[in-house]
Amino acid sequence: MSADAVMVGARSGLAYHHIRPEWAADIAALELMSYPTADPTDLYDEPSVRLLAHDFPEGCFAGFDGESLVAMGVGVRTHFDLDDPQHTVADIVPNDHSSSGHDPSGPWYYGTGIATHPDYRRRGIGGELYELRKRVCRELGLAGIVAGGVIPGYAEHKHEMSADDYVAAVREGRLYDPTLSFQLANGFEAPCALANYIEDPAVDSWAALIVWHNPDFERGEEPRS
């Protein structure tokens, strides 16, 4: 699978490819496996991955170990107002999967899904997927990356603090979150929590807004198609 790879992970050794429609079922199954407490309707299914592979393959990646698909990182271009950040995942990708949510004129890359097979975690794959997304932003002249990031550690603190206080504590290094702390270490900001972002009873459906600003972005320039 590595012959036409867009990148081979320096740490993981995985071969990363732009997603293809024929991998849609495996990509959807991998995401569902990675988020067992999430509502499946908030995640990708096979038809919606096929739409994404048609609309924005250059911004979506699948990672392979040999012939086995073990990682995915997908997203769309969108218009996003950082001054009015509250939103849900359904505001970006319709729950009825009637479209991929991709707007080819959008100046932001919105990360809609990222997952790694449980047997392949702690091998640097998340960082490699973020690097691929950052590369897309640089190549297309996008403002940066935005996403709603899961905060699994909040499940242990939700009865003692608000989600915004939890995000602030992780941001300031007073608490550790296995996902958000990693994102902060990869150059993301976490300005606030997002209410009802994705149905997940473990964290009362809270997420964190994460933002990465492309240092090469020229304000006022039109992003490339």
Image (cartoon, rainbow, N blue to C red):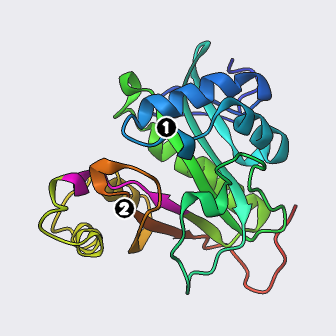
Q: Residue 51 location in percent, x, y?
A: 79, 40
> Quadrant location of the N terminus?
top right
Q: Residues within 10 Å of mark 2 (few under 14, many from 20)?
A: many
Q: Is 120 drawn above or below residue 31 in the view shown? A: above
In depth, the one of 48 and 116 nearer the eye is 48
In the rendered image, the residue lying farthest to the left is 160
In depth, the one of 58 and 39 nearer the eye is 39
Residue positioned 51% across, 69% down in the render: 211
User: How far separated are the C-alphas under marks 1 and 2?
Assistant: 18 Å
Residue positioned 74% across, 71% down in the render: 107
The magenta segment: 147-155
Amino acid type, callout 1: Ala
Which disc is residue 58 wearing? none
In depth, the one of 188 and 34 nearer the eye is 34
Decide if residue 178 is in sight here.
no
Is 36 covered by the magenta stretch? no
Q: Is 177 drawn above or below residue 84 in the view shown? A: above
> Quadrant location of the C terminus?
bottom right
Amino acid type, callout 2: Trp
Is 153 covered by the magenta stretch? yes
Judging by the rendered image, the residue that carries numbered circle 1 is 115
Residue positioned 43% across, 58% down in the render: 186
Decide if residue 120 is in sight here.
yes
Q: Residue 152 location in percent, x, y?
A: 29, 50
Which disc is residue 206 wearing? 2
In the rendered image, the residue lying farthest to the right is 225
- For residue 183, what is the image quadrant? bottom left
N-terminal label among 1 and 2: 1
